[in-house]
Image (cartoon, grey):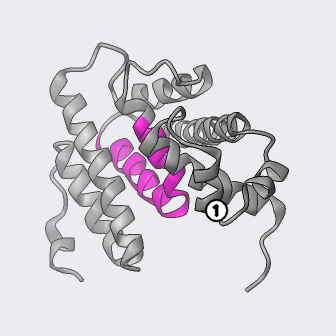
Amino acid sequence: MPRQTREESDAEIVDRASALFARHGYRHTSLQQVADAVGYSKAGLLHRFTSKEAIYLAAVRTAAESTLALVADVSSIVEGTERDRVIIAALVDATYERPGTWAFLHAVFSDEDSDDTAAELRQAGEALAGLLGIDSGSAADARRVRLLVAATGAHHAALTAAARDRTREWRPHIIDAAMDALGHRSDRSTETGS
């Protein structure tokens, strides 16, 4: 197995730290917890990042950039079923690739009153929310609940699929289930598959 580049190692540190920030919050995540999660000593971690705040800011930047990239990819698709499907598929794929980053993003937006959320991440999330039809305050509660169920369910199902080494096999089922949660009737042909 080839050795990771510095950029790949740093991305892994940020992703694992993001998962801790999602689970415990910034204030309740220690630098030692991050070091333990990535298999570094505290001193070794501080050699890569100057502080816990630097890791947090990298997590915020990574989540914001990932979100804005998704927004750019789907903004030309007309609002509706196809756009929802592309967004859900992208969220599933992103969870497979960087689970901590997407757990962090989800946690940040599940806590609407959080003062810890950096402005750039909040703006990126608002752009994505707008594409999903939930501009601040304008969407019906039913759409908000459906999106919460779809995004949370897809994220957790993708994590489970990855843990069971079933990412490829479960992907279409996860997307169909999330689309059902959004109120889009899916093609039931995938339910008979593996």
Q: Is residue 18 left or right of residue 190?
A: right
Q: Residue at x 71, y 63 (%)?
A: 40
Look at mark 1 in the image and give the residue it sits on: 38
Locate residue 55: give its quadrant: top right
- The kind of secondary structure the magenta stretch mainly shows is helix
Question: Which quarter of the rendering shows the C terminus?
Answer: bottom left
Numbered range of the magenta stretch: 81-107
Q: Residue at x 74, y 62 (%)?
A: 9
Q: Measured along the vertical axis of the image, is residue 12 above or below residue 121?
A: below
Q: Measured along the vertical axis of the image, is residue 61 above or below residue 9?
A: above
Q: Residue furthest bottom?
A: 1
Q: Is residue 56 left or right of residue 107?
A: right
Percent x, y for residue 78?
A: 40, 35
Q: Residue at x 46, y 57 (%)?
A: 95
Disc 1 residue type (three-letter): Val
Q: Residues within 10 Å of mark 1 (few under 14, many from 20)?
A: some
Percent x, y for residue 69?
A: 60, 41
Front one among 12 and 166: 12
